[in-house]
Amino acid sequence: MQRIKHNYQFNLIRGAIELLPKKVKPYLDQVDFVVDYNPYWLGYNPPKAIKDGRSYLNTCHCVWSWNTPDNKPVIFLYSENLRLYDNPSEVIWHEIGHAIHEQLDLFTCDWIGITNYEKQDWDWWGCECFACSFERWLFKDRQVDDWENNQEMQRKYDKRPIEFFNNLFGKLN
Ligand SMILES: [Zn+2]
């Protein structure tokens, strides 16, 4: 279910999507966005806390389709969380990365994580590494992301994600 109250929220999401390569867009056909809603009001029943202690009630996240009432992946966004980042689009791209991963059957991703967030031992199927790698892949000629990373940095650690996303979506530029 899509729940976007205000035009500026819609524009923020549309702006982030417009910057994505064309071949990413079919992966968004089935994805819904919810902005600034309490998941419980919408019939979702998230766990009380994320494994690192944050709450699903105010942290942007992607809900896998099998956990949603209409079997579509849903990206929950929260303004107060987006405001913590210089570029909110990067958070949206990260969550879109999760939605892409699900549509690729959530294969176990054994790429090497760069940030501590990707190295957490609860993430045994590598979904954070997948989403962060996707987001880094988008930064070829766009300087560095919020975490000071880009394709060049990715290549130093593990070049498999670059090859993976180049094959799937085409090389950037
Ligand atoms: Zn994530």
Image: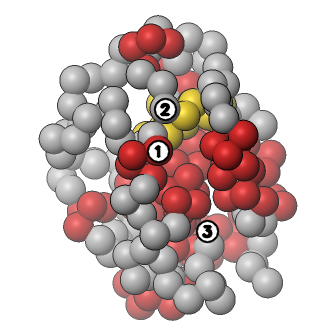
Q: Earlier in the sequence, mark 1 or mark 3?
A: 1
Which residue carries the number 1 mark? 79
Label 2 vs label 3, nearer the camera: 2
Determine the CA span between mark 1 and mark 3. 31 Å
Which residue carries the number 3 mark? 164
How many numbered marks does the figure carry? 3
Q: Position of residue 168 (x, y in %)?
A: 72, 63
Q: Earlier in the sequence, mark 2 or mark 1?
A: 2
In the rendered structure, are the residues bearing label 2 and label 1 in contact, judged by CB atoms less than 8 Å apart? yes
Judging depth in this view, the residue of 79 and 94 nearest the camera is 79
Q: Residue at x 44, y 11 (%)?
A: 41
Please determine whether, in this image, residue 101 is positioned above or below residue 42. below
Q: Which mark is residue 70?
A: none
Q: Position of residue 161 (x, y in %)?
A: 53, 71
Side of 138 relative to 37 (left or right): right
Q: Position of residue 106 (x, y in %)?
A: 50, 42
- Residue 109 appears in view: no
Q: Position of residue 85 (x, y in %)?
A: 42, 64
Please determine whether, in this image, residue 148 is positioned above or below residue 17. below
Please determine whether, in this image, residue 73 is positioned above or below residue 145. above
Side of 171 relative to 41 (left or right): right
Please determine whether, in this image, residue 5 is positioned above or below residue 68. below
Element at label 2: loop
Label 2 Cα neighbours within 10 Å, binned few <14 / some 14-19 / many ≥20: some
Determine the CA span between mark 2 and mark 3. 33 Å
